[in-house]
Image (tube, rainbow, N blue to C red):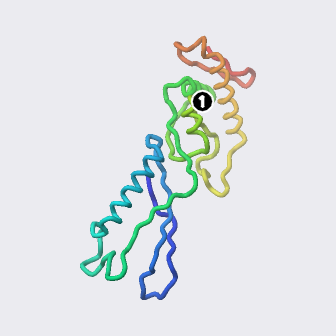
Amino acid sequence: STMKPTQVKCAVGSLNQLPPWVEISGDVRLTPFYEVPALRARLDEIVGEMNADLSTLPTRGPHSKYEIEGARGKLELTWGAGYMEGIACTLGSEGNLALIAATESVLGEAKPYSICGSLPLVRDLQRGGFDVQMTGFGLMTSYHADNECCKLSDMGKGFRVLLGVIVGLSLSARYRRGAWLFTYSEDAPPALS
């Protein structure tokens, strides 16, 4: 998980004066093993502790203070509206096994990996009992770029992988205890054996 400042603004004044307020905005990327409400509660608690005793905050020497006669600094944490959560896919589930098998069949190998990010509603689906798996076939070299793109040939392979997942899961009741093995050729639809 990370918490990072991404924007800073302050009251405009003279260059030789400290501004009366500074606002730092940022972003938290929480790994899916933590809950957002718990994070918010803990950060609110930490800010409350710092405000209760500003002397615990680091300063730059004996004349650097957060409290002087007639003025006292204050930290304030506000939360933006809404949030998105990441998920951790269930690696041993039927959906994951079908996705790996179909990927290996079409691409020759599967290289599962993790990336921090979030998608709207996906965690809610997982909490609702759905076997949520994610895959993509775009170019990682342009991931989140202004010119994010893909190759039609990769999308064709992706379509065949997803077709293999559908075939595998539709037949899974008969193969729950067996190994997954998909075959694919340009002339025939994917088959599970």
Residue 7: x %, y % from top left: 52, 67
Q: Residue furthest left?
A: 62
* Left or right: where 154 falls relative to 177: right
In the image, 69 versus 34, the foreground residue is 69
Numbered disc total: 1
Identified at 64% across, 26% down, the residue is 165
Q: Which residue is mark 1?
A: 103
Q: Amino acid at mark 1?
A: Thr
Residue 124: x %, y % from top left: 57, 38
Determine which quarter of the picture holds residue 180. top right
Identified at 59% across, 35% down, the residue is 125
Residue 11 higher or lower than 102, as above or below:
below
- Kindly state the secondary structure of the residue where label 1 is placed: helix
For the C terminus, the image quarter is top right
In the image, 185 versus 86, the foreground residue is 86
Identified at 46% across, 76% down, the residue is 21
* Left or right: where 32 falls relative to 138: left
Residue 121: x %, y % from top left: 61, 41
Residue 187: x %, y % from top left: 75, 22
Identified at 58% across, 13% down, the residue is 175
In the image, 115 versus 74, the foreground residue is 74
Q: Residue furthest top?
A: 174
Q: Residue furthest front?
A: 70
